[in-house]
Amino acid sequence: MKSTTPKQKHQSGYPTARKIRRACDNELYRTAKRLGIYLPKEKLEAAEKLYFKKVAANLIWISENQSNRRKLADWWDENVSAEIAELWEVDREKLQIAFRDAFGG
């Protein structure tokens, strides 16, 4: 017997905390790699925690715009980059360029 409710094939739910944490970690790792500088593990972990908190606080908007990398990169520039640049002691503009290069936005 077939279900009467239509399936939404490409409509996924919200990502799990594990998926968010791993994505944040990967994006920051790629960004740091593109900056070409050494960052201690403590600074990477602190930035990952900060980024995870920001993403979790804006999860609804981020999941609505998950297919628009440019909007997500713009959001990152406005809401996250200043604090991570200060934490990593790097120029904010260079960090934003490295993130866009790593993220694809």
Image: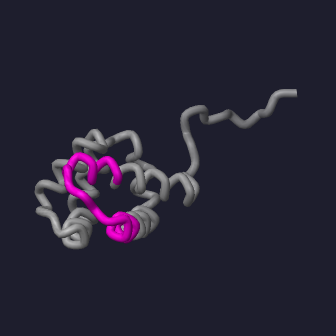
**Quadrant of image for the N terminus:** top right
Compared to residue 17, the image places residue 4 above or below, namely above
Asked whether, in this view, residue 99 is left or right of residue 27, the answer is left
Q: Position of residue 36 (x, y in %)?
A: 20, 50
Residue 81 visible in this rendered orientation of the protein: yes
Q: Residue at the far top: name it.
A: 1
Asked whether, in this view, residue 6 is left or right of residue 46, the answer is right
Residue 54 visible in this rendered orientation of the protein: no
Compared to residue 96, the image places residue 67 above or below, namely above
Is 45 magenta? The answer is yes
Compared to residue 10, the image places residue 53 above or below, namely below
Please report the residue visible at 79 percent of the width from the left and 33 percent of the height from the top: 3
Q: Residue at the far right: name it.
A: 1
- Camera-side residue: 52 or 69? 52
Total marks placed: 0
Q: Position of residue 105 (x, y in %)?
A: 26, 42
Please report the residue visible at 32 percent of the width from the left and 47 percent of the height from the top: 30
Q: Quadrant of residue 75?
A: bottom left
Magenta range is 29-47
Q: Position of residue 16 (x, y in %)?
A: 58, 55
